[in-house]
Image (cartoon, rainbow, N blue to C red):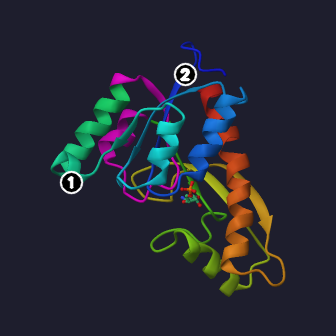
């Protein structure tokens, strides 16, 4: 295990199953990613990502307008979590909420999001989950992939940090294409987090 106190702290925001979070936990565990996951938070108390965090001994927080009383309360709580743990990089891994601008400003150039297409293609409003892969198949594109980008106040429009390509193959369904892209996500996110930690 490389949970050394000298490693920089990262934090992860999720809304759903948290398979990308799991990939980060596993890479930290085997020493490929020299970081400490200080906390995980979700807007969704039932998110399996929170359970994955607990199983790995990582503090898991449900942070929503309901738990905090208001959107301003969410902003305050996230800022407090960032400050208190000296977070170097904040990772959005399937986080379905817009991150408060004050949180983005608190970590300039150090908030990243993963998106399951080659942005700017198949990004923006409504382009999440299976909808992305449906749209790729409908377009007849032969290629899709993964994008990791910096988070700015315009969703899905921050500078691209890393992209990897996945083929669309004959007979693909949204589910089969989604599974291929997700596997690529798992092998891509930790590499960019490591690179970002090395240069910040
Ligand atoms: C991933 O496809 C990610 O790119 C997108 O949401 C999905 C999250 O999956 N932003 P998981 O919760 O990491 O399994």
- At a point 50% along the width and 30% down the height, the residue shown is 57
**How far across and how far down the image is residue 105, in percent?**
36, 38
Q: Residue furthest right?
A: 170
Quarter holding the C terminus is: top right
For residue 109, say whether it is visible: no
Among numbered discs 2 and 1, the one appearing first in the sequence: 2
Q: Is residue 72 above or below residue 109?
A: below
Q: Residue furthest left?
A: 69
Task: Give how far apart the Cα atoms at labels 2 and 1 are.
Answer: 31 Å
Q: Which residues are magenta?
A: 84-107
- At a point 39% along the width and 56% down the height, the residue shown is 46
Residue 97 belongs to magenta span: yes
Circle on res. 66? 1
- At a point 31% along the width and 48% down the height, the residue shown is 100
Q: Residues within 10 Å of mark 1 (few under 14, many from 20)?
A: few
Q: Which mark's residue is nearer the viewer, 2 or 1?
A: 1
**How far across and how far down the image is residue 84, in percent?**
34, 23
Q: Is residue 74 above or below residue 9?
A: below
Looking at the image, do the residues carrying marks 2 and 1 touch, with CB atoms under 8 Å apart?
A: no
In depth, the one of 109 and 176 nearer the eye is 176
Q: What residue is pinned by disc 2?
A: 8
**How far across and how far down the image is residue 120, in percent?**
60, 65
Q: Residues within 10 Å of mark 2 (few under 14, many from 20)?
A: some
Helix, strand or loop for disc 2: loop
Where on the image, by quarter, is ligand 1?
A: bottom right
Q: Quadrant of residue 36?
A: top right
In depth, the one of 118 and 186 nearer the eye is 186
Q: Quadrant of residue 183?
A: bottom right
Helix, strand or loop for disc 1: helix
- At a point 58% along the width and 18% down the height, the residue shown is 7
Q: Is residue 184 above or below residue 30?
A: below
């Amino acid at each position: 295990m490389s949970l050394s106190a000298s490693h920089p702290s990262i934090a992860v925001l999720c809304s759903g199953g948290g398979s990308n979070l799991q990939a980060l936990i596993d890479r930290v565990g085997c020493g490929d990613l020299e970081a400490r996951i200080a906390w995980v938070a979700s807007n969704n108390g039932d998110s399996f990502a929170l359970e994955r965090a607990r199983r790995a001994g990582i503090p898991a927080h449900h942070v929503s307008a309901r738990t905090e009383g208001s959107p301003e309360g969410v902003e305050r709580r996230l800022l407090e979590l960032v400050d208190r743990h000296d977070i170097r990089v904040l990772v959005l891994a399937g986080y379905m909420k817009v991150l408060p601008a004050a949180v983005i400003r608190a970590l300039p150039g150090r908030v990243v999001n993963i998106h399951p297409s080659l942005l700017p293609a198949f990004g923006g409003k409504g382009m999440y989950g299976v909808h992305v892969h449906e749209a790729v198949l409908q377009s007849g594109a032969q290629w899709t992939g993964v994008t990791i980008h910096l988070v700015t106040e315009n969703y899905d429009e921050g500078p691209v940090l890393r992209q990897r390509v996945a083929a669309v193959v004959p007979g693909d369904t949204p589910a089969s294409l989604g599974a291929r892209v997700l596997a690529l996500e798992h092998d891509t996110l930790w590499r960019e987090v490591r690179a970002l930690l090395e240069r910040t």
